[in-house]
């Protein structure tokens, strides 16, 4: 049991999904051959002038609305000066005193308890390039494709008090940004990255302890592990009467440890000053209303819609909204076949299972929501058995054929032919007179045998349900 309270504040960097970069017209798409997506502006050549991307500003404001922030109607860009080989201008255009968004609030749930985490600010800035370390030749190469990709930095107040809360917070932010449509939040590709500021204090302390900052964590797992490691490291120092040094640390995923990188810079080390090449951003109420109106439906609203209008259970609704892609697909499917509960059940038990098995990815499903709707409807209306429906889904993942085609091809389509059903039942009864006699004289156990014979003869022609009804009716008429 630890004697300390953990205090955590997060800085989350999220790359915005604009087509072009924030101050030039280069493509902002992820990847590309090294240095093929840059120009004199984003590589900081002397004499070039940046022009701000209006969509980037709009996306940052959308993020602000999604995270419950106030939007500053008047906001300013600043130069943050530092040298690093991935930053050819030797300064980053960012925002210091007047960021676009302030005072947000995000409720997160951990173990059924809701914690409100305050967002201090969201500002817009540009990303830096990337260094590629070539250990074989002993050199580092600079790739400037990422230079100038629009980034928002979301800074929280130090309201987070555990690794679990930090994880829940990042998950919630990631969900909100994806729903807002401003970031794809792929931590493995670096479009969402997190710095953790962490310190410990005694319950009786009146001031926060000295913090360490762990830079550039790129998975939820490493956020959790880095926090847990730091909690131990700092507690040990404090227990020995030593002090925590304010510094920037790096988390080593393989070792599960953080290591000192450099002593922490203060804001004045960066010699911030107002960026002379970029105009201030001024909004009117109408402009902000317009952006707000463009904001897509956010997860909480969807959740209530699923529970209230569709009658999904709270647990199921939560799983569906947990991924925007899944939720969008669910909505699309429902718009093709209005049976939300049944569709939800099929998504949760079958589709997500296939995805978890790695057979297919939600990002590129080989079938449409319309086809998926057809499949669920076929199973619901006994055109195929429930079991065969699962198999057909597997086929749909492997081929581009429609569920109906696949059901026909594989002899799974049940086309109920009542005449045939009645004829077959008559034949089965005629072949088993003794058993029919037994049934009529009250020995109803033999029903199962007759049912089995009929089902065998009627495979693909009728569902067991139909066979059972017709067989019961026929036997009743013989009494
Ligand atoms: P800087 O400009 O040096 O990065 P900020 O004041 O912007 O510092 O804070 C950065 C982050 O550190 C914020 O998320 C804030 O909540 C967090 N933070 C500040 N002080 C502490 C502390 N003593 N312990 C933990 N986190 C802290
Ligand atoms: Mg900072
Ligand atoms: Zn460029």
Image (cartoon, rainbow, N blue to C red):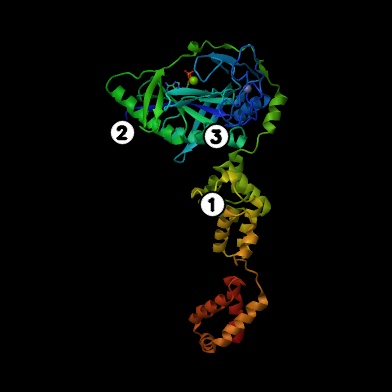
Q: Is residue 298 above or below residue 205?
A: below
Q: Nearer the viewer, mark 3 or mark 2?
A: 3
Mark 3 in CB contact with mark 2 (< 8 angstroms) = no
* Picture quadrant where residue 408 is located: bottom right
Tell me what residue is drawn at x 56 percent, y 75 percent: 455
Q: In terms of sequence position, does the residue under pointer 3 or pointer 1 come before the other? A: 3
Q: Nearer the viewer, residue 455 or 300?
A: 455
* Residue 280 numbered tag: none
| Circle 2: element type | loop
* Picture quadrant where residue 292 is located: top right
Q: Nearer the viewer, mark 2 or mark 1?
A: 1
Tell me what residue is drawn at x 52 percent, y 89 percent: 434
* Picture quadrant where residue 383 is located: bottom right
Mark 2 in CB contact with mark 1 (< 8 angstroms) = no
**Mark 3 crowdedness (10 Å alpha carbons): few <14, some 14-19, many ≥20:** many
Give the image location of residue 10, x and y in percent: 48, 27
Q: Is residue 219 visible?
A: yes
Give the image location of residue 37, x and y in percent: 61, 26
Q: Nearer the viewer, residue 319 or 379?
A: 379
Q: In terms of sequence position, does the residue under pointer 3 or pointer 2 come before the other? A: 2
Q: How far is disc 2 from disc 1 in space, using C-alphas?
A: 39 Å
Q: Nearer the viewer, residue 441 or 60?
A: 60
| Circle 3: element type | loop
Q: Answer with the quadrant where ligand 3 appears in the image.
A: top right
* Residue that carries the numbered disc 3 in the rendered image: 185
Give the image location of residue 433, x and y in percent: 54, 89
**Mark 1 crowdedness (10 Å alpha carbons): few <14, some 14-19, many ≥20:** some
Which residue extends farthest front? 137
Q: Nearer the viewer, mark 3 or mark 1?
A: 3
Q: Is residue 133 above or below residue 355?
A: above
* Residue 348 numbered tag: 1
Q: How far is disc 3 from disc 1 in space, using C-alphas?
A: 23 Å
């Amino acid at each position: 049991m630890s004697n300390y309270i953990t205090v955590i504040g997060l800085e989350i960097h999220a790359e915005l999904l604009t087509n072009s970069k924030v101050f030039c017209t280069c493509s902002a798409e992820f990847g590309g051959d090294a240095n093929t997506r840059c120009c004199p502006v984003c590589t900081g050549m002397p004499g070039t002038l940046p022009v701000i991307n209006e969509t980037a500003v709009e996306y940052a404001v959308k993020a602000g609305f999604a995270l419950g922030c106030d939007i500053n109607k008047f906001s300013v860009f600043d130069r943050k000066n530092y040298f690093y080989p991935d930053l050819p201008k030797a300064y980053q255009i960012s925002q210091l005193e007047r960021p676009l968004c302030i005072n947000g609030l995000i409720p997160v749930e951990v173990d059924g308890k809701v914690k409100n985490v305050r967002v201090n600010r969201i500002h817009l800035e540009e990303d830096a390039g990337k260094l590629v370390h070539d250990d074989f030749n002993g050199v580092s190469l600079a790739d400037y494709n990422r230079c100038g990709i629009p980034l928002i930095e979301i800074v929280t107040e130090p309201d987070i008090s555990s690794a679990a809360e930090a994880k829940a917070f990042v998950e919630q932010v990631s969900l909100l940004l994806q729903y807002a449509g401003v970031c794809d939040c792929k931590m493995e590709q670096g479009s969402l990255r997190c710095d953790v500021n962490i310190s410990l204090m005694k319950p009786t302390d009146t001031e926060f302890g000295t913090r360490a900052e762990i830079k550039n964590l790129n998975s939820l797992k490493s956020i959790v592990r880095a926090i847990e490691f730091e909690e131990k490291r700092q507690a040990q120092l404090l227990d020995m009467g030593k002090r925590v040094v304010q510094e920037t640390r790096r988390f080593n995923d393989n070792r599960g440890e953080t290591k000192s990188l450099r002593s922490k810079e203060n804001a004045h080390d960066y010699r911030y000053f107002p960026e002379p090449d970029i105009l201030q951003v001024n909004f009117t109420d109408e402009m902000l209303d317009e952006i707000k109106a463009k904001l897509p439906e956010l997860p909480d609203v969807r959740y209530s819609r699923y529970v209230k209008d569709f009658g999904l259970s709270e647990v199921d609704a939560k799983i569906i909204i947990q991924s925007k892609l899944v939720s969008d697909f669910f909505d699309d499917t429902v718009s093709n076949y209005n049976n939300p509960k049944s569709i939800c059940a099929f998504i949760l038990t079958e589709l997500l299972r296939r995805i978890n098995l790695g057979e297919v990815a939600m990002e590129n499903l080989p079938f449409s929501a319309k086809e998926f709707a057809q499949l669920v409807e076929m199973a619901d209306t006994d055109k195929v058995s429930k079991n065969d429906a699962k198999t057909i889904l597997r086929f749909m993942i492997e081929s581009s054929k429609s569920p109906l085609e696949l059901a026909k091809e594989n002899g799974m389509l049940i086309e109920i032919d009542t005449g045939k059903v009645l004829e077959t039942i008559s034949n089965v009864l005629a072949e088993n007179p003794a058993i029919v006699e037994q049934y009529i004289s009250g020995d109803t156990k033999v029903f199962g045998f007759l049912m089995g014979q009929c089902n065998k003869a009627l495979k693909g022609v009728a569902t067991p349900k139909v066979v059972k009804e017709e067989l019961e009716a026929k036997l009743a008429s013989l009494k």
